[in-house]
Image (cartoon, helix red, strand yellow):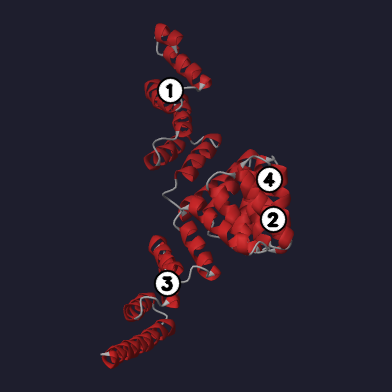
Amino acid sequence: MIQLVEGKKNGETGNNAINRKRAKEWFEKGLDTSDPEEKLVYYARALKSNPEYVEAWIEKGNTLLGLGVAESASKCYDMALEIGPDSLKTLIYKGNALFAAARYGEAVECYERILSREPETAETWLNEGIAYARIGNAQKALDCFDRAISIEPEFANVWLCMGDTLEIIGKYEEALEAYDKGLSIGPEDASSWTSKGKVLRKLKKHEEALEALKKALELNPESFRAWGSMAASFYVLERYEEALEACDRAIELEPEFAGPWNDRGIVLVKLGKLEEALEAYEKALELRMDNANTWFNMCDVLASLGRYEDALGCYNKALKLDPRSTSAWNEKGNFLQKLGRPEEALKA
């Protein structure tokens, strides 16, 4: 009896060894191919042969994450952590997957676990800071960025993310300093030149804003946001033809985005092209009906064209979206007066 049991155990051990060998072969096939769909097939076969193959779970997760399937990737990392709970590498992958899945609170918890073991990792502090920023906790985000900079002062992306966060909370001068520092280290980031231009616009430094935006467009001529920001600065500087060209370029790049259409209408009004402005506002509202400002802009054009009933209808729609606009109520009253409806005007 004892010999029979021993023989069975030896048989199981042999089968396990065969399965592990087969799993490794499938796993290596997955590593060798560049096709992500093929990778997933090979990793699935490896895991069927050996469900406790940690590296296969990790690589399957990495492949899914690369395909944008963050939730499924996170589950793969969970499986890897069940088998090897002390793997810092897997924990880092899981944090990144949670972030990609927009599960920012859970990502923060994951980054905290990593930092409790490796507190001097600037990249993890950066990732945690970005996650905090995404859930609206700007101060925590800035604290994380400060910690990252204390570890790695020349980490350009930390400075740039700090600039983004400071801009969101209205600290424009500090944001500008952060962008300047980040761009002095890593000057090839087009989106950060655009962000710097945006901050300079808010500081009413429009000539400097244009210089930053030109740099952004040198790096990425297809940035519709940079073209849109450039249009806004040209407009303030009363360079209306250039503003119109910038609006048109933004629209060419992103025709389904309402903002440049609204801006185009504003510029066309300044150029005295009211019918074209009206068409631009109509297109903006076709793309986004809930923008009160576009309705208000359209009202002004209709009034200038003497179409007071149409303008009144626009004001009613705008005031449903923004009922606290005192100036809009006053303008509605003025239209009602022009239409010979004084009692309604008084109520407005």
For the question of whether residue 211 can be seen, the reply is yes
Q: Which mark is residue 249?
A: none
User: At 39% from the left edge and 27% from the top edge, which residue is drawn?
Assistant: 317
Q: Nearer the viewer, mark 1 or mark 2?
A: 2
Distance Cα–Cα, label 3 vs label 1? 61 Å
Q: Nearer the viewer, mark 3 or mark 2?
A: 2
The three-letter code of the residue at mark 3 reads Thr
| SS for dot 1 | loop
| SS for dot 4 | helix
Earlier residue among tags 3 and 1: 3
Question: Which residue is labeled 4 in the image?
Answer: 200
User: At 29% from the left edge and 93% from the top edge, which residue is drawn?
Assistant: 3
Question: Which residue is labeled 3 in the image?
Answer: 63
The three-letter code of the residue at mark 1 reads Gly
Q: Nearer the viewer, mark 4 or mark 1?
A: 4
The reply to whether the C-beta atoms of the residues labelled 4 and 1 are less than 8 Å apart is: no
| SS for dot 3 | helix
Distance Cα–Cα, label 4 vs label 2? 27 Å
Earlier residue among tags 1 and 2: 2
Q: Nearer the viewer, mark 3 or mark 4?
A: 3
Q: Is residue 230 above or below residue 91?
A: above
Question: Which residue is labeled 1 in the image?
Answer: 306
Q: Residues within 10 Å of mark 2 (few under 14, many from 20)?
A: many
Name the quarter where the C terminus is drawn. top left
Distance Cα–Cα, label 3 vs label 2? 31 Å
Earlier residue among tags 4 and 2: 2
The three-letter code of the residue at mark 2 reads Arg
Question: Which residue is labeled 2 in the image?
Answer: 147
Seen from the viewer's position, the closer of residues 93 and 67 is 93
